[in-house]
Amino acid sequence: MLEALYLNDSYLKEWKAVVEEVSREKYIVLSRTAFYPKGGGLPNDTGIIRRDSDGKEFRVVFSGKFDGKISNEVDSAGLEKGDSATCFLDWDRRYKLMRFHTACHILSSIFFRRANALVTGNQLDVERSRIDYDMEDFSKEKVEEYIAEANSIFAKGIGVKIYYMDREAALKIPEMVKLKNAFPPNIPRLRIVEVPGIDMQADGGPHVANTKEIGSVRLVGMENKGKQNRRVYIELAD
């Protein structure tokens, strides 16, 4: 069973693994991995797989989840089944995505509480991220007000908790699901990301440990994407 290390340690930057599968020379399945696979509006991680026997490095250019396995596409052939390796995460990229990810959870909680707005889509990236909401009042004044509230929450330095709950119990909590027409995966136990007093969501991605790490975000764009489907673009302010 592949061990997805990022689920329990978002800050792991280096780890040991064994190559379990190689397909078409460049698609690698590791015994354990901290490379997050693209999904849920989050881009994949990138980094390096260094073969222990000779030190040769293979750059991870894409990670995705297929048939329940995390597959890492590398930039050159050469890795073989059974190779032991040391893996390195592209940390600067990951950390920006973590900051954005936690920021978006908190911001979406504010939109939900203040405007009853559910998330209809999202896409994070290292330069800017966007979130789509189902909402009526889409004035710039209101959006900037919600972002200012989020920034004030970030500054409080609230610890972010990650734990697991039985799916049935988790879905009884009204604010657990903030996605329109979408529910968490049909698995018996859900991974919960909680910012105490602010937000609680079932989520499988990496997050910062404390809201202060986010810094602040600013509005960089707004779009109407159809009836009550509103798009908000943000970037990290520092």
Image (cartoon, rainbow, N blue to C red):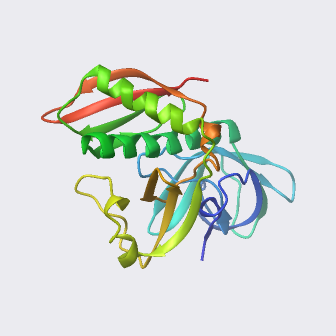
Query: What residue is at 70 percent from the left and 63 percent from the top?
Result: 80
Horizontal side of residue 11 vs 115, given as left or right? right
On screen, residue 176 above or below 142: below
Locate the C terminus and report the quarter of the image it occupies.
top right
In the shown orientation, is residue 86 left or right of residue 33?
A: right
The residue positioned 71% from the left and 57% from the top of the image is 79
The answer to whether residue 83 is seen in the rendering is yes
Residue 87 seen in the figure: no
Q: Nearer the viewer, residue 21 or 127?
A: 127
Q: Residue furthest right?
A: 54
Image coords of residue 217 (percent x, y): 51, 28
Q: Nearer the viewer, residue 24 or 137?
A: 137
Residue 190 in the image: state x and y as whole percent. 46, 70
Residue 170, percent across and down? 39, 71
Considering only vertical position in the picture, is 148 above or below 158? above
User: Residue sitting at 30 percent across and 40 percent down?
Assistant: 114
